[in-house]
Amino acid sequence: MSKGLCTFWLDGRCFGIDVTDVQEVVQYQRLTAVPLARPVVSGLLNLRGQILTALDLRRRMELVDRPEGQDPMNIVIRTDDGPVSLLVDRIGDVVEVEPDSFEAPPDTLTGVARDFITGAYKLEGYLLLELDTRRVLAGLATSQI
């Protein structure tokens, strides 16, 4: 049975999140800084009256910071503690992937990012890395952010 992944780009790589974890995708909005927060926390986002924590996936995955002047996009995901916004470079499409095309994470993927990837799908023209949002958020309980 195929699975739907919401795709996005981060530092030139394509990632996907299970569509059942995604609440919505929104354009970049100005964030309110959180004094003394971890560097991965870019700030707080007011989404129609609901305050969400915005986490920069580049920083969480220990990638270089986004180039100056390039606004990120928000992928709002559902968690047990409520919605959280993940900041990404740009949004892709929702794609259907087949279980038989699933492979282990590539050996070329190193560092912290490798810990967050469950595997990869070879699609036409690019490699899609499936991101486990639970692993990304592990150790970042909203009460500790």
Image (cartoon, rainbow, N blue to C red):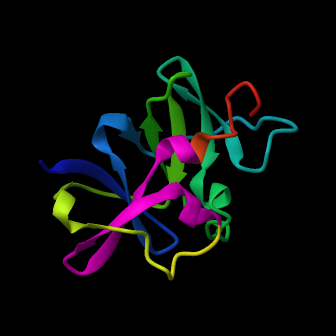
Residue placed farthest to the top in the image?
Answer: 49
Image height check: is 98 above or below 106?
A: above
- Residue 101's x, y, as percent? 21, 67
User: Which of these two is toward me, 68 or 119?
Assistant: 119
Q: Report the label total.
A: 0
Residue 33: which quarter of the image?
Answer: top right
Magenta residues (range): 112-135
User: Which of these two is toward me, 108 or 61?
Assistant: 108
Residue 113: which quarter of the image?
Answer: bottom right
Is any atom of residue 21 visible in this view? Answer: yes
- In the rendered structure, the answer to whether residue 26 lies left or right of residue 1 reads right
Image height check: is 139 above or below 108?
A: above
Magenta span contains residue 73: no
The residue sitting at 67% across, 58% down in the picture is 59
Residue placed farthest to the right in the image?
Answer: 36
- Residue 109's x, y, as percent? 52, 76
**Quadrant holding the C terminus:** top right
The residue sitting at 44% across, 77% down in the picture is 106
Magenta span contains residue 121: yes
User: Which of these two is toward me, 98 or 140?
Assistant: 98
Image height check: is 57 above or below 144?
A: below
Is any atom of residue 129 visible in this view? Answer: no
The residue sitting at 39% across, 63% down in the picture is 119
- In the rendered structure, the answer to whether residue 37 lies left or right of residue 121 reads right
- In the rendered structure, the answer to whether residue 32 lies left or right of residue 69 reads right
- Residue 136's x, y, as percent? 57, 47
The residue sitting at 58% across, 54% down in the picture is 57
